[in-house]
Image (cartoon, rainbow, N blue to C red):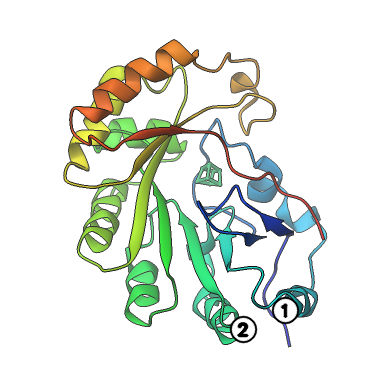
Amino acid sequence: MSAFDVKGYIPNTMLDWEGMLAATIFLPGCNFRCPYCQNPDLVLRWHELKSVPFELIQKHLSSHDGWIEGVCITGGEPCIHKDLPELCARIKDIKLGVKLDTNGSSPGMLERLIRDSLIDYVAMDVKAPLDPESYQKAIGIEDDDIVERILQSIELLKGSPIEHEFRTTVVPKIHGTAEVESIAASLAGEEKYYIQNFSSTKTLDDGFSNLKPFTEEDMDMMLERARTHIPGAKKRGTSSGMEHL
Ligand code: SF4
């Protein structure tokens, strides 16, 4: 049986779960249209991508028991998939940890995954200051209650024992020091907050594909402002790109 529509699989990587040797599963589709998205095929044209049979993934993961420590589930946005809890449960059956990458827009799904002990680590994007105008600009869609749902997800993670981090991909035209400081202020008291620089190689909106990423100096200035609220805030490079098995 495999109803899970996996569109990409990285058999092992150290880039996606800090301190862990993990495999990464890419699920298709997303409810956001961030103009700077670096996985536009997975968001817009996922039905044209070849699927990776879950049986193959299961076989690979089982045969590396004790070596691979966990599986990152990313996308796209994994939480739009109703069968995500079952996918996590299948990975747990192999006695591997599960890390979830999410845009935080589905607090109901997040709550269920936490309640049923189906995830061990969550990396949640906080894409913009938590006001509707800024958030909708960053996610490229109109969504009247998105800020409310993002806040719910933040509160869920803050109040849960699940290890987690918040992160922002910083993008010229969308972010600057004021935006990063505002995001960090809304996460004050948290331990882990990362800012990662935008990369312009391939973007959902062509208008962003020639945009120059921030310089290291710009990144340092944003980090300094973030640290006024979260002393442990850090810069980080990008995660793995999507590959097929
Ligand atoms: S950046 Fe993430 S949340 Fe935004 S459209 Fe791409 S996959 Fe979705």
Which residue lies at the image location 55% right of the left edge and 58% below the top edge?
20
Q: Which residue is mark 1?
A: 58
Residue closest to the eye, 203 or 92 = 92
Horizontal placement of 67 versus 127: left or right?
right
Tell me which label, 1 or 2, sits earlier in the chain: 1
Which residue lies at the image location 71% right of the left edge and 81% below the top edge?
62
Foreground: disc 1 or disc 2? 2
Please give the label number shown on residue 3.
none
Which residue lies at the image location 44% right of the left edge and 38% below the top edge?
139
Quadrant housing residue 129: top left
Position of residue 77 measured from the top left corner of the image (x, y, whole percent): 53, 56
Position of residue 7 measured from the top left corner of the image (x, y, whole percent): 73, 60
Q: From what the image shows, is residue 2 above or below residue 24?
A: below
Crowd rating for badge 2 (residues with CA inside 10 Å; few <14, some 14–19, many 20+): some
Which residue lies at the image location 80% right of the left edge and 56% below the top edge?
244
Q: Is residue 217 visible?
A: yes
Question: Does the CB distance between marks 1 and 2 fall below 8 Å?
Answer: yes
Horizontal placement of 55 versus 129: left or right?
right
SS at mark 2 in the image? loop
Residue type at numbered disc 1: Gln
Q: Which residue is mark 2?
A: 94
Position of residue 68 measured from the top left corner of the image (x, y, whole percent): 65, 68
Horizontal placement of 81 versus 137: left or right?
right
Queried on whether the Cβ of the residue with tag 1 lies below 8 angstroms from ligand 1, the answer reads no
Separation of disc 1 and disc 2 at Cα?
Answer: 8 Å
SS at mark 1 in the image? helix
Crowd rating for badge 1 (residues with CA inside 10 Å; few <14, some 14–19, many 20+): few
Q: From what the image shows, is residue 158 above or below residue 69?
A: above
Q: Is residue 26 visible?
A: no
Residue type at numbered disc 2: Ile
Queried on whether the Cβ of the residue with tag 2 lies below 8 angstroms from ligand 1, the answer reads no
Quadrant housing residue 73: bottom right
